[in-house]
Image (tube, grey):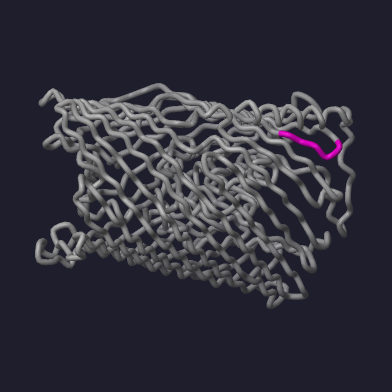
Amino acid sequence: MRPIIAIFISLLSLARVHGQDTTKPKQVQLKGVEVTGKKPLLEQSIDRTIVNVDAMISAASSNTLEVLNKTPGVTVDHNGTINLNGKGVLVLINGRTTYMSGQDLANYLKGLPGSTLDKIELMDAPPAKYDAGGGAVINLRLKKNTILGLTGNISLSGNQGIYARTNDALNINYNYKKMNWFASFNYSRDAAYDEDKTNRDYFTDSLHVYLLTHVKGRSNTKGIRLGMDYNASAKTVIGFEVNAQQRPSIYTRDYISEASNDSTSTGFTYSDANWKNFSGNLNFLHRFDNKGHELSADASYISYNNHDEQNLNNDSDFFNYRLVSDMRIFAAKADYVHPIGIEAGAKSSFVKNDYDSRYYTDKWMQVDSNSNHFIYNENINAAYISAKRNWKRWGAQAGLRVENTNITGRQPGNTAYAASLFKRSYTQAFPTVFLSYKLDSAGNHTLSWNLGRRVNRPNYQQLNPFIAFENSYTYSTGNPNLRPQTNYRTELKYQYKQWLGVGLQYNWFRDIIFTLSDVQDNIYISKPENVAKGYIAMVIVNLNLHPAKWWDLNANMLAGKMQLHGQVFSTAMNAGTYSARVRLYNQFDLSHGWSAEASGDYSGRNINGQDIINPRFIMYAGVQKKLWKNKASLKLNAEDIFRTAGQNNHSAGVKDSYYTHRGIYDSQKIGLAFTYRFGRDTFARKRNHSDNTADQEQERAR
């Protein structure tokens, strides 16, 4: 750790030696567009927070999941679950859903270099045009510009923890006459090292079990993106975009369990997987005039395929799993906007998820009792309408979204299990209301209030009733009887320019979905359940300060209480806790092209079902040097400087048992990145179409 700190001290000292020159960057005229200085890290608007990723030094050597974890208000746990201000999220890429969640979404975002990101849009209270799934919305905007001629940028980066990683990307734009072509190529090499230590006490048998698990792995992700916008006329734009990604990976898991009755168990798993994704999108935008009167439509097709061969050894008992999953998605939508303040639209999506798990002996004889084939079909049809009106000081917006959901899940059956089938259809309404008031004529001081209803649907694999083996003391299974979780939210917020935002927020939930553990014959069986209702009441403060000409500070603070009420199997759940989270982000302009950043993140005590998660803090730092008339940059950054990102948690409410857990991960890293921007500096017209056809379904394919 000392060498890392020494490197940063040396680089910062070298930069400061050049003096305290605070001269502003010179202004450049780009055919009527004036660019002065750099973009701020955060920009606040009435319904969202915008994060300018290029302002984050560490983004160039990080993947997208790591960038999200450093974003104010966003948390990412070790399982890849993403939250915004304590709520689950719907993640969009360029306005379109990924139809993934959990570990699958995390792996996808790990394969997307942070240097491909332009902006991150955080919507704590999404309006009616967005799908109702997820408590909040995070929209990742990839780089695409409209500068005339050939432009682009290249990013080469690597970082070193226990293992080495790379994140490399090339982004290209070619804007000629009526056509704007854009493409990106990326390659990333990821690695994993996890060490989990669990101590379990079983009260009925007075038994103590110690479990030690190590996970090691590597993956290589190759991705390509190609698209074009064609200006058919001055008012009409037609476009397409295709994306493809492939991620082969190899992971190993070994565990040992030691019990107080002198029994010992060992196991080893070897996984060789190949994951592929393809997506295509067609989109259309017609502007009737220049006053905001427009019609847009787009259609998306997405496929995911994963083939995983697993070899398992449990106490010298050898067996094999062949896991094949195939998901196909089609979504289409249309939106109409009228300048009088009316917006309306409709969307339909169709999802088919085919998950086939085959269990074989060491001689490759299939064992039907341990095999599973689960086929899930889902259709969601939605329509929305919203209206807004602005007066001298007052502003109002109201919307209603109605979604009809039809799902079918079936297991074809085999010699050991009979075929099974479940069907479910339901229609739900999701109203939203926004009010704003300018406290002064300039609009520097504003008050706003919003109210909304959203839903968290079970992800596809949570509905699969198959029982999966993890180790001799742990199994997991799905639940086809899960109901959607309903979320209600209201917030009163004060905003002063871009400097200060203070929000009082109250969220209440019904049919909360938690993955819970029941103990049977000293085996933990984990299963998702609708177990509780509850609320989160909190205050959120966001500060953007300038303590000095060379120093920008962003402080994001959240404090509040969570309370749950429900039943966990035969045990009552009445858990509650006060918690706080503070994230500080400092940027330093050190003159002569040098800049630096330092940030810290404290997360207080938290509750996740039967898990009580202890507080932790993480620190990051980075330094940057601009080169070649600001067309290139060299960036050095350190993550988890004091190696404090590990998770400590313990149980509450597990029947006749108690456990503690400590997880240590490969989170302490030092990285180096080089970026170079090439091309002309003349802007063309921009396209404002928000092409968010596939907004939700991918988000749930865990």
**Image location (x, y in percent) of residue 393:** 65, 38
In depth, the one of 443 and 690 nearer the eye is 690
On the question of residue 49 being in view, the answer is yes
Left or right, 276 with respect to 637, comes to left
Residue 93 falls within the magenta-colored stretch: no
Above or below 380: residue 217: above
**Image location (x, y in percent) of residue 237:** 65, 72
Q: Residue at x 32, y 32 (%)?
A: 534
Left or right, 164 with respect to 361, comes to right
Quadrant of the snapshot with the N terminus = top right
Taking the view exactly as shown, the residue that stands out farthest to the front is: 316
Residue 584, picture quadrant? top right
Left or right, 486 with respect to 320, comes to right
Q: Which residues are magenta?
A: 592-596
On the question of residue 396 being in view, the answer is no
Q: Residue at x 53, y 70 (%)?
A: 281
In depth, the one of 475 and 478 nearer the eye is 475
Above or below 96: residue 434: above
Residue 685, picture quadrant? bottom right
Above or below 157: residue 257: above
**Image location (x, y in percent) of residue 70:** 57, 38
